Amino acid sequence: MYLIRSAFIVLILGIFASGTAFATTQASFDVKNPKNHEINKKCIMCHLKENKSLVLQWENSPHAAAKEGQIACYTCHAAEKDDELGYMHEGAFIKTILSPNDCGKCHEPEAKQMAPSHHATAGEIMASLDNMLAEVVGGMPTNKANMASGCWQCHGSVLTLKRDKDGKVLRSKTDAPQLDHNTWPNTGIGRINPDGSKGVCIACHSKHSFRASVARQPENCGKCHLGPDHPQKEIYEESKHGIAFYSAQLGGGSNAMNIMKDGKWVLGDDYYTAPTCSTCHMGSFIKVNGSVAANSHNVGDRISWNLRAPVSSKLNRVTFTDGTVTDITGEMPPRPGQKAKYKTYVREGNKLKKVVAEKTIDTVITWKQRRNSMQEMCKSCHGINQIHDFYKQFDDLVNLYNDKFAKPGKKLVGMLKKDGIWENTGFQHKIGYTWFEIWHHEGRRARMAVAMNAPDYTHWHGMYEISRNFYQEFLPEVQELADHAGQGEKYKKVIQELLDRPENLWIRTGGSAETMKLIEEEQKLRYDQ
C-alpha cells in the first residue's frame, strides 16, 4: 500500500533522533528492510510540513506505486560514508544530489544507453565557441552568470563543492556540503557530477514524480531545444507531426495519444495519432514483421546526418574493443579492425581534461543502418516510397547548404586564418559574428527544419537568411579585411572565382530579364502595384 499521509499521523517523531542509520546506498536499496521503511516514513512526515508539494509529487509517482511504496526518500538519497556530498540529516546519512550512477542501480539499461549519448556529453562545451561567447565575450572574469544561468542550465555544469584552503569541503550549519552557486542549482542534461558521471536523469524525468509520461511530451524537450541555433520545438510545432499531436487528445480513446500510460508506450499499439520527439528519437514501435523495436535512451541512435557542424557529414557509430563508443563521420564508414581516435573528457578536480587515444574498432553501425532504423519507425505511418522521397529532399537541402555556402565559407575562413588576417576567435571583427550566425544559427535552422518538416524554418528562417548574409555581409567583410591586410587582390580573385560558379551567376545577371518581367506582371495583378 502507498505511504500516504494519513498512515503516518501517529508516527513517533523521535525515531532515529540519535545514532547512525544505514549509511550506504547498498543497504538503502534493501526495500524489505523495516529499518529503511521507518527512515522513509520519518522523511515523509517531516517533508509534509517543509515541502508538501514535493511529497505529493512522490506520492503520485511510479516509485511510490512500486514495492508497496518502499522506493522512497532514503532508498535513493542514502549516501556512502565516504561520499563528500553526504551528511547526517535527522539520523540518516544522505545526499541531496543524485547522479546517473544512483539511478542506474535500478535502471541499468537506461543509464548505459544514456552514458555515451549526445545528451550525457552535452556538458563538454568548455572548448567550444558557444562557451567562449558566453563566458568571455558575454561575461566577466569575476562573473560567470551568463554561463551559470544560461548555457549550463541546458548543457550542464561541472558540479563543484566549495572548499577551504586545505581542500576540505565547506559545510553549512546543518553540516550539508556547500556548493558553488555557479554550478548549482543545475539540471543541465550533460552535468558532470562529483562522482565523475555525466548526465542528469531529472532533466527529462522531472523530480519527484519521475514519470515517463513527462518525458514523452514535446514540451519537455523545449527547455533546451529551442531558440536561434536549434529551434526544434518551434520546428516541431510547425510540422505536420506537431499539428497532429496538438490537435489530438492526450488521454485514451480514438484519435488519442494515451500519453499518461504507465510502463511501455509503443507506437502502433498504445497510440498511433502522432509522433512526439521521443517517438522518433527514442521510442518503441511495432515493426513490419509484428515485433516491437526496443526504445533507447541514446537519442542519436537513429540520426544519420550531423546537422550541428559548420559542414554536415554522415555519422557512423563505432564501438571499440574496450567497449567505448564514438561517432566517426564520413560517407564511407570505417571497418572493424581499423584504428581510430577516441576523444573523451574526464573530471580532474573541478575541471575537465581532454583525453585522446587511438583504439581498435570492434563493431560499426553505419550511417545507412542508423537511417534504416529511423525509416523503420517512419513506416508505422508512411509508405516506403514517401519515406525514401522525403529523405531525398532532406539530403538535397543539406547538400545545397554544404556546397553553396558552408564549404566555400569555411574555405575562406581557413584562408583568412592561414594568412594571419582572422585573429584568434575572429569575434574582434564583425565577420566573426556573421560567419558564426550563418552556420551556427541560420544553417542549423535550415538543416534541422528540413529534417523535421518545417518549411518556414527551412526557407525564411534558414536558407533565405543564409543567402542574404553570405552575399551581402560575409563576402564583403572578407574582402574588407583582406584589403586592410594588404592582400586584397588575392581575395578578390578567389571571391570572383566563387561567384563565377554556375550557382552564383545570378549575382551578375540579377536573374533573367524574362523572369523579372513575369514577376513584375504578377505583382501588378496581385497587389495592383
Image (cartoon, rainbow, N blue to C red):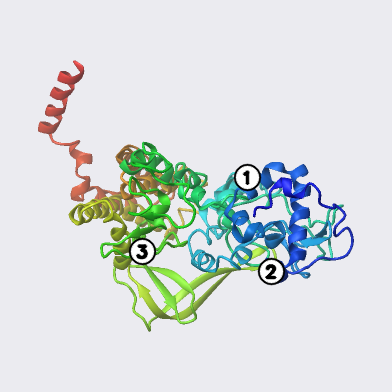
Of callouts 1 and 2, which one flags the residue occurring earlier in the amino acid sequence? Answer: 2
Q: Residue furthest right?
A: 18
The residue that disc 1 covers is 149
SS assignment at label 1: helix
In this figure, which residue is indicated by the disc labeled 3? 293
Residue type (three-letter) at the residue carrying disc 3: Ala
Residue 54, horizontal then vertical, whole percent: 68, 46
The residue carrying pointer 3 sits among few (fewer than 14), some (14 to 19) or many (20 or more) residues within 10 Å by Cα, namely some
SS for dot 2: loop
Q: Is residue 310 visible?
A: no
Query: The N terminus appears in which quarter of the rendering?
Result: bottom right
Left or right placement of residue 10 versus residue 160 in this view? right
* Residue 24 sits above or below residue 142 on the image: below
Q: Nearer the viewer, residue 414 or 213?
A: 213
Q: Secondary structure at mark 3?
A: strand
Instruction: Give the mark nearest the N terminus, 1 or 3.
Output: 1
Q: Label 2: which residue?
A: 30
